[in-house]
Each structure stands twice: as structure tokens, then as C-alpha cells.
Amino acid sequence: MNEDISFEKAMEKLEEIVKKLEAGDLELEEALEKFEQGMKYSKYCLDVLDRTEKKITLLMQDENGNLTEEPFEDE
């Protein structure tokens, strides 16, 4: 799979694969190939979401009840 693909494009590809698999029109070997491709797209999307989640700014409340923004510390 091309790692330069956007998250949105990867999701589109994953949805196409799911529709083809759900239709049940594929032969076993082709279905297995589509399943493997789908798993790669799924992992890529989950990785992108995980990295994005880590970049999101956390809102922290101080002892006075004021909200402050702190960047999430990436490992």
C-alpha cells in the first residue's frame, strides 16, 4: 500500500473493499486478497488516527478552575 495516500482516500478504498466482500460475488482467492488489502488499509487508518489523537491539544483545568491548553507530549 502507498503510504503517501490520504486518510480519506484510504477510507474510500476500505469501504470499496468491504462492499465487494459483503456482496459475496468474489471467488475465495480474490476475497482473501481483498481481505488482506482491507486489513492494510484498516491498520493505516488506525495508525493515522492514533498519531492525530496524540497531536490534539489537551485542555487542562488548573486549581482555580481555569482551563489552560497544553500540548500532548508525544512519546
Image (cartoon, rainbow, N blue to C red):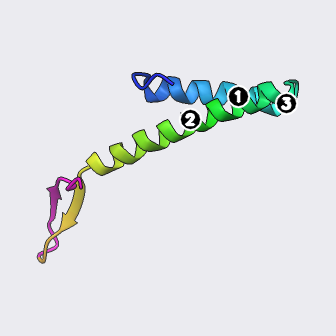
Q: Earlier in the sequence, mark 3 or mark 2?
A: 3
State whether residue 60 is above or below residue 24. below
Please tell me which residue is depicted at 60% across the width and 24% down the height of the picture.
13
Residue 8 place in picture, x, y as percent: 48, 27
Query: Mark 1 = which residue?
Result: 34
Q: Earlier in the sequence, mark 1 or mark 3?
A: 3
Per the image, is 47 magenta?
Answer: no
State whether residue 47 is above or below residue 75. above
State whether residue 69 is above or below residue 55. below
Query: Mark 2 = which residue?
Result: 40
Q: Label 3 neighbourhood size at 10 Å, few (<14), some (14-19), many (20+)?
A: few
Q: Label 1 neighbourhood size at 10 Å, few (<14), some (14-19), many (20+)?
A: some
Could you tell whether 50 is left or right of 22 in the image?
Answer: left
The one of 22 and 26 positioned closer to us in this rendering: 26
Q: Are marks 3 and 2 in contact (CB under 8 Å)?
A: no
Please tell me which residue is depicted at 27% across the width and 46% down the height of the picture.
55
Helix, strand or loop status at disc 2: helix
Residue 2 place in picture, x, y as percent: 46, 22
Q: Which residues are magenta?
A: 64-75
Secondary structure character of the magenta stretch overall: loop
Separation of residues labelled 1 and 2 (CA atoms): 10 Å
What's the residue type where badge 3 is placed? Leu
Residue 71 place in picture, x, y as percent: 18, 53
Please tell me which residue is depicted at 61% across the width and 38% down the height of the picture.
39
Q: Is residue 18 visible?
A: no
Could you tell whether 52 is left or right of 34 in the image?
Answer: left
Could you tell whether 45 is left or right of 35 in the image?
Answer: left
What's the residue type where badge 2 is placed? Lys
* Residue placed furthest toward the left: 64
Q: Which mark is residue 28?
A: 3
What's the residue type where badge 1 is placed? Lys
